[in-house]
């Protein structure tokens, strides 16, 4: 029965992924799709298989069940133009259950307010905020399930919108040692009206697999994911991580079929109980590259 459920889930998501997109430009709260965490940034927006990854549940709600954790993480991303994205994450799990909290804030910077004659009359600061809780359960030794539930807030000049959002994630650990198959549905929810219309959330489906090849003092992890947002075409994320004695981690990824993004890279350093991460995402010549930093303390 469980094999049938897995096949049905993966096929449903895959078929949805390959549908023709006709919704570009109709959806808001796009910051929900930006991988702020430097681990995810370096691994092409994936990285749920990376150890000591406090924010993995923001990508797949079941992911933190793969690793025992009790940590607090602060992350910041210098995104496009003057935008900055920050996250504060709490993660506590024992491989059987997981509870997490995250606050994500997108700061657009300062915008001018001008009258009909283009005279400066003031300034305003647009802002997006998402507060979310995570709950994960190992329902069977090789079946992991998780859910995120949160609230949204977006503010422009004189208009604002509130909403609720949720994510669902599933991970299957097949008989092949050190491998996994995952699937998720993210950004399910509703919002209040922004001026005259409610903002639609960018519903996203994803499925993929990962594998780790262990050596004496090294581990190499590879991961491939196919994702489809309701307002974009099908995309593929490919990533790899090399871990050296669980102290230094080198990361590399590539995003296929993205309008502006391509190569990603980064590293992680574990010192005592602290992990320092960096992620870099390359953009086209029209846009600046982005840089993400994070520091995580493991209790």
Image: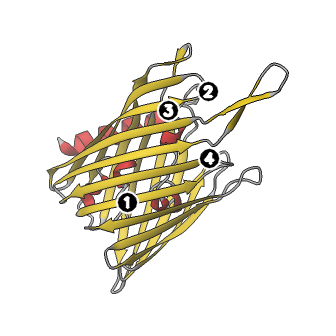
Q: Name the quadrant containing residue 186.
A: top left
Which quadrant holds residue 176? bottom left
**Residue 181 vs residue 69, the one in the foreground:** 69
Q: Using residue 103 as the reference point, say whether residue 92 is left or right of it.
A: left
Image quarter hosting the N terminus: top left
Residue depth check, mark 2 versus mark 1: number of the one nearer the observer: 2
Instruction: Find numbered disc 4 in the image and state the secondary structure of the residue it sits on.
Output: loop
Estimate the x, y position of residue 222 in percent, counting from the top left.
Answer: 43, 65
The residue at the far front in this view is: 121
- Which type of secondary structure does the marked residue at label 1 adopt? strand
Residue 171 is situated, as x and y percent measured from the top left of the image, at: 29, 51
Q: Position of residue 151 (x, y in %)?
A: 37, 33
Where is 154 relative to 116, above or below? below
Q: Which residue is mark 1?
A: 73
**Front tag of 3 and 1:** 1
Query: Residues under labels 3 and 4: Cα distance?
Result: 20 Å
Crowding at dot 2, Cα within 10 Å, few <14 / some 14-19 / many 20+, comes out as few
Q: Does residue 278 sit above or below 243 in this rendering? A: above
Query: What number is the disc on residue 131?
Result: none
Q: Which mark is residue 83?
A: 4
CA gap, disc 3 to disc 1?
26 Å
Quadrant containing the C terminus is: bottom left
Which residue lies at the image location 57% right of the left edge and 49% below the top edge? 84
Mark 3, residues whose alpha carbon is within 10 Å: few (<14), some, or many (≥20)?
many
x and y percent of residue 134 in the render? 28, 45
């Amino acid at each position: 029965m469980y094999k049938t459920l897995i096949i049905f889930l993966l096929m449903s998501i895959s078929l949805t992924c390959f549908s023709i997109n006709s919704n570009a430009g109709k959806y808001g709260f796009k910051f929900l799709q930006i991988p702020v965490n430097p681990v995810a940034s370096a691994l092409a927006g994936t990285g749920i298989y990376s150890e000591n990854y406090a924010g993995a549940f923001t990508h797949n709600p079941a992911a933190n069940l793969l690793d025992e954790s009790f940590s607090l993480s602060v992350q910041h991303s210098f995104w496009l133009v003057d935008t900055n994205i920050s996250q504060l994450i709490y993660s506590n799990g024992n491989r059987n259950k997981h509870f997490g909290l995250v606050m994500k804030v997108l700061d657009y910077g300062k915008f001018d307010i001008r009258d009909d004659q283009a005279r400066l009359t003031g300034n305003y600061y647009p802002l997006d905020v998402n507060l979310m809780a995570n709950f994960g359960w190992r329902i069977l030794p090789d079946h992991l399930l998780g859910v995120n539930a949160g609230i949204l807030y977006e503010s422009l000049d004189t208009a604002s919108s509130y909403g609720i959002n949720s994510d669902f994630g599933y991970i299957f650990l097949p008989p092949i040692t050190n491998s996994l198959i995952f699937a998720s549905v993210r950004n399910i929810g509703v919002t209040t009206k922004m001026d005259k219309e409610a903002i639609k959330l960018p519903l996203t489906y994803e499925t993929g697999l990962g594998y780790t090849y262990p050596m004496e003092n090294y581990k190499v992890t590879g991961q491939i994911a196919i994702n489809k947002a309701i307002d974009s075409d099908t995309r593929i994320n490919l990533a790899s991580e090399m871990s050296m004695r669980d102290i230094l981690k080198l990361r590399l990824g590539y995003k296929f079929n993205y309008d502006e993004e391509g190569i990603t890279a980064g590293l992680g350093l574990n010192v005592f109980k602290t992990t320092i991460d960096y992620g870099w995402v390359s953009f086209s010549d029209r846009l600046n590259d982005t840089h993400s930093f994070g520091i995580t303390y493991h209790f």
